[in-house]
Image (spheres, rainbow, N blue to C red):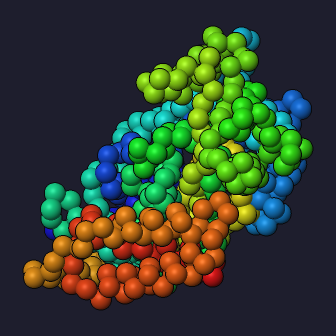
Amino acid sequence: MTKNYDVIIAGTGAGGLYTAINLPRSLKILIMTKRDLILCNSALAQGGIAAVYKPTDDSVRLHTNDTLIAGGFKNNPDSLKILVNEAAHEIETILSLGVDFDRDENGELHRTLEGGHSRRRIFHHKDSTGFEITTKLQETVKSLPNVDILENALLCRLKKTSTGFSADVLRNDEHNTYNSRYFVLATGGIGRVYDYTTNSAIATGDGITFAYEMGANIKNLSLIQFHPTAFKNKDTRECFLISEAVRGEGAYLKNCNKERFMQNYDERLELAPRDVVSHAIVTEGRRLESDEFYLDITHKDPEFLKNRFPMIYKYLLSQGIDMTKDMIPIYPCQHYLMGGINVNTSAMSSIDGLYAVGECSHTGVHGNNRLASNSLLEALVFGRQAAEDIARRIEADGETDISALESADFPINTDAEPVPHGIRTEVRHIIQKSYFVIPDMQQALAGFERVSEIKRMLEEGNYIIDYNYVEAKSLTTVAYLILKEVI
């Protein structure tokens, strides 16, 4: 089966959904997701979305400066200008779509504080902001008659054609081809390349790998953010995040001696940017020869904590911890990718017609380290930038018959074998050991050689093209690109 569209969007996080919403209703759009519609990193975002919106003591200049400081002044100034200036528009839009942000006793939108921010500018829905936003965006997309939604659809191969793009998609054990004039990658992050991550199960870097294989410019893939306060439970690969907002509301970081220690590392204490705090924890742990660390907010009013952080409170109770009485065991783990598919201010990659939005993209707004709660904002702002650029180009091109789109050939080998078991686990171990908070260069060199071998094997072998193969190849390619930048 072959189907044709004006635009295909791979990924149903905030970036992909918002792109679809902002595209003209006259276009035929397909939005697909590898698993269930709600399974994405956007839905896991707890803290909130940063924006200067109807401010009192805040300004775009201050938001810009905070972002620059967190990013080590390596941010792309053009992209950053768009991010902070368009923030108010996106807040207004998602409010109109029904997003329910918390409000104070006067009915005004409540703003919280997070690490690296000099003002309270984080809009939130309790401690499940990402879920609230993506849920409301999904409802809007589902109501659009020009948008088809394809769940449990694995993008296996992607090719550039003379008329646009051609995608091989596996669904219900059947391969089908979908063609489009424009293609938007919104496939999320790379967290599953680590043993421990806050990312969802689908964050295997597929979109970055497809773009790389097509010749797109991939930039700064080694700029990986480790969140300092993941719940320490090594029984699961997917670590529960203790939101930055908990420190924003006054939580203390404590070492194995139950002592605060951030004063020895940064004058901003617990509210230093994430890279600083993560580095401080690992350094302190080496000094004390312990990886036992805690987040302590027991000095705050219990009812306030239960109301402000209901999801975190409930989860911790299920783990035998009452955050109103007990300190929370934490340790850094992989959280976010600042690099990715390099795009311009319209979110288009170096390949004409191929766009990337959200975590798989590299807009440059974050610099060397992302400021808390700028990620959901980036997904929305540049999702709309992509949609508006596509709309401009389609209007300039005039009427195009999408039934005439070229369809690429995607051969299927009937004698192919399953990909060897254990590849993804091996790659994860390599990256976890070699490129965590403080990299180990000897491990990185040895790891690069082994990852290169695995990459060649996957590229040259005759394997069944399914979930196991696609994700193994994606994780291996991502690991290869990370270590290649490092060594």
Q: Is residue 83 left or right of residue 394?
A: right
Q: Is residue 153 left or right of residue 446?
A: left
Q: Is residue 163 above or below residue 200?
A: below
Q: Is residue 2 above or below residue 104?
A: below
Residue 170 in the image: x percent, y percent?
23, 64
Q: Is residue 82 above or below residue 234?
A: below
Instruction: Name the one closer to the observer, 56 or 42.
Output: 42
Residue in the picture at 83% in, 36% down = 119
Res. 267 visible in picture = yes
Most extreme residue toward the left is: 414
Which image quarter: residue 33? bottom left
- Quadrant position of the C terminus in the picture: bottom right
Residue in the picture at 86% in, 46% down = 264
Most extreme residue toward the front is: 289
Q: Is residue 246 left or right of residue 426?
A: right
Residue 277 in the image: x percent, y percent?
74, 48
Instruction: Name the one closer to the observer, 470 or 136.
Output: 470
Number of marks in the rendered image: 0
Q: Is residue 215 left or right of residue 330?
A: left
Residue in the picture at 63% in, 26% down = 327
Q: Is residue 391 above or below residue 138?
A: below
Instruction: Name the one closer to the observer, 354 or 323.
Output: 323
Residue 281 in the image: x percent, y percent?
71, 48
Residue 18 in the image: x percent, y percent?
51, 48
Res. 394 visible in picture = no
Residue in the picture at 15% in, 62% down = 173
- Quadrant position of the N terminus in the picture: bottom left
